[in-house]
Image (cartoon, helix red, strand yellow):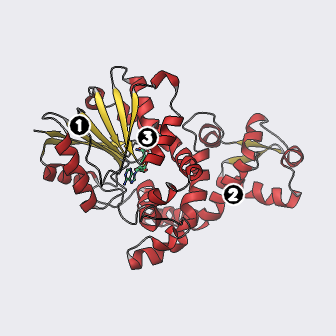
Amino acid sequence: MGDSQEFDRVYERFQLIVNGPALFNAVVTALELDVLPFVSRHPGATFEELRDHVGIEPHKLRVLMLALCATELVERRDGGYVNSRVAEEHLVTDSPEGWRDTLLGWRKFQYPAFPHLTDALRTGKNEAALASYPGPGNTLYDRLANDPELVASYHDSIGPFTHLFAHALLDNAEIAEVGRLLDVGGGDGTTAIKFVRRHTHATVTIFDMPSVCRHAESGLPDDVKGRVLTYPGDIFEDDFPGGFDGILFSHSMEVFSPEHNGRLLAKAYEALPPGGKIFLYNMCAPDDENSGLLSARLSLFLNVLASGEGMAYPPKDYERWLTEAGCDSVRSYTGLPYEHALVVGVKG
Ligand SMILES: C[S@@+](CC[C@H](N)C(=O)[O-])C[C@H]1O[C@@H](n2cnc3c(N)ncnc32)[C@H](O)[C@@H]1O
């Protein structure tokens, strides 16, 4: 690519990024005001039809529709509006993998924290953003635990992403062989439920905070009861339970510092029998740390609010930590969708 084409490409990306916060909010508002779903139900809907449905001032709707058309999620065609395929497949779908709840969650939990980024990076602490969630503890997870409604709302917002990301994990032949899996930081059980439905010989035990385990239990469908279990506790303070042939950390290791992860891996290694496997499934920056929009956003969010540490570590970091924990045959499955990698180690 010539210099000027490359300049134009980066400049166009720059425009998207700097206008992104406003356009992001326009998209979320369009979901809240039922604009995108309405256009989906009525392709070619006119401005007047939309106005009658949405019930906001025509000028405000005009501004919103301009923003949506600028994103190209909606197109103005032959006097009406139609959704793009991306809007149809990712925003107005009823599928559990739709991005709707994820984006509502980013607006509620993630983006209000970002004005504190400079402070968080300067001080090395997430205190400024965390102040919005009063209570004991130094992480967002500790603070959410004080309020069952917030626990539910937070996990509802990460559930769709977990659905989306779970495919590559469930497709992996090594984890498919595990009969008794401990899911550390297993959250609301989205992964566990999908796992036992796909691998009908298996049971999965979610090891998470008591408040999160209660939330997971309350949402367990009948067909998995008895095969998805919970083990409420603190993954740092409590010993890991025994009796498992595999231990999974799915997006629970990206959250913490290398020192914390070393402690968790030592405890996981200790709890496994010889031949047992540790599975680390995370959003991962590439080893050269030179790209990755999802990895970059997640890493910033973790540091500004969620834990004040961690990042979308590259696979080579996980490989090193597994080796340091004593594992043999450490290997990575890289290039998985949505910037994911699965790193596996075996207890010798
Ligand atoms: C990013 S979520 C990952 C959820 C799920 N495994 C997934 O793949 O989407 C991190 C999880 O770790 C849990 N967690 C964080 N700190 C914990 C602690 N000290 N003890 C137990 N669980 C903890 C949180 O409650 C949360 O469910």
Q: Cβ of disc 2 within 8 Å of ligand 1?
A: no
Q: Nearer the viewer, mark 2 or mark 1?
A: 1
Q: Cβ of disc 3 within 8 Å of ligand 1?
A: yes
Q: Which residue is mark 2?
A: 26
Label 2, label 3: how far apart the Cα atoms are? 26 Å
In the image, residue 52 sits, relative to residue 127, either above or below, namely above
In the image, residue 321 sits, relative to residue 130, either above or below, namely above
Please name whichever residue, 189 or 292, is drawn nearer the observer in this view of the structure.
189
Where does the image place residue 36, in percent across and percent down from the top left?
A: 72, 44
Label 2, label 1: how far apart the Cα atoms are? 49 Å
Contact flag, marks 2 and 3 (Cβ < 8 Å): no
| Residue drawn at point x = 40 percent, y = 73 percent | 125
Q: Please indicate whether residue 276 sits to the left or right of residue 173 in the image.
A: left
Dot 3 alpha-carbon crowd within 10 angstroms: few under 14, some 14 to 19, many 20 or more: many
> Callout 2: helix, strand or loop?
helix
Where does the image place residue 51, in percent across and percent down from the top left?
A: 87, 49
